[in-house]
Image (tube, grey):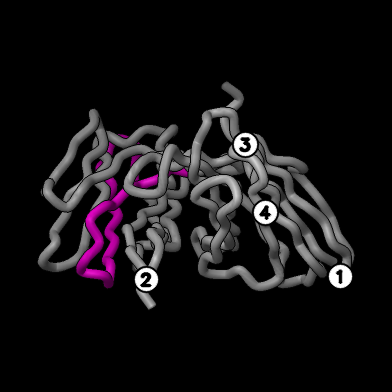
Amino acid sequence: GENVEQHPSTLSVQEGDSAVIKCTYSDSASNYFPWYKQELGKRPQLIIDIRSNVGEKKDQRIAVTLNKTAKHFSLHITETQPEDSAVYFCAASFYGDSNYQLIWGAGTKLIIKP
Amino acid sequence: NAGVTQTPKFQVLKTGQSMTLQCAQDMNHEYMSWYRQDPGMGLRLIHYSVGAGITDQGEVPNGYNVSRSTTEDFPLRLLSAAPSQTSVYFCASSYSEGEITIYFGEGSWLTVV
């Protein structure tokens, strides 16, 4: 079946440095790619998303890039802060026989070291 | 708006017991879904509904039933609990099916012993 691979599973960076999380998807027809942030014990929340007609999208310190040819997309966080510590999930849209689904990556635990 | 409300937040079940996780949303969303989250596995779709009276299976439906009698409510029923169903369960909703923001409930931590 379709899948999304997410790397790394854990990422530790110094406060103030940048963090990059990468996802690769299998369905070439996927055209929507959201990123969700989940703080410890909390619910996942959308932080940014990108559609296939756009190569890059920015929102303050976070950005997402998409390479449709290579079927991968990445989350970039600059000037990391302690509140960025969380698990980040990527996802890719998938259209099955009769329905639409999001296929999720396994998550990346981001640790910001003071 | 309260958003997506799930109950209970924590539950311990014995193997073979049944129970229902409740989910309600007050945003008039048509699309509702249930996910389970296991460590290292990300989010896996159990069942979903595109509107009242319509439900369908997701990636991991076995052992679970759902119903959607109203737009607001989407309960998830565990038929005969098994230790493999120990997980965190999230209910989610969105305005429609498709490429838009999904709103999650706070989660229900279920342990089956």
Q: Nearer the viewer, mark 1 or mark 2?
A: 2
**Where are the magenta residues, as a range?**
A13-39
Q: Quadrant of residue B46?
A: bottom right
Report the residue at 46% width, 40% height from top: B94
Image position, residue A63 (x, y; %): 22, 40
Proximity of marks 1 and 2: CB atoms separated by less than 8 Å: no
Q: Tell me the subunit letter for badge 2.
A: A
Q: Tag 4's secondary structure? A: loop
Is residue B47 rendered to the left or right of residue A103?
A: right
Disc 2 residue type (three-letter): Asp
Please give the label number shown on residue B15. 1
Alpha carbon of mark 1 to alpha carbon of mark 3: how far?
30 Å
Q: Which residue is mark 3?
A: B72
Q: Tag 1's secondary structure? A: loop
Q: Nearer the viewer, residue A108 or A54?
A: A54
Q: Nearer the viewer, residue A90 or A15?
A: A90
Q: Quadrant of residue B56?
A: bottom right
Give a yes or no on whether discs 4 and 3 share a subunit: yes
Q: Which residue is mark 2?
A: A97
Is residue B39 rendered to the left or right of residue A47?
A: right
Q: Which comes before the other along the chain, label 4 or label 1?
A: 1
Alpha carbon of mark 2 to alpha carbon of mark 3: how far?
27 Å
Please give the label number shown on residue B67. 4
Q: Nearer the viewer, residue A94 or A109?
A: A94
Alpha carbon of mark 4 to alpha carbon of mark 1: how far?
23 Å
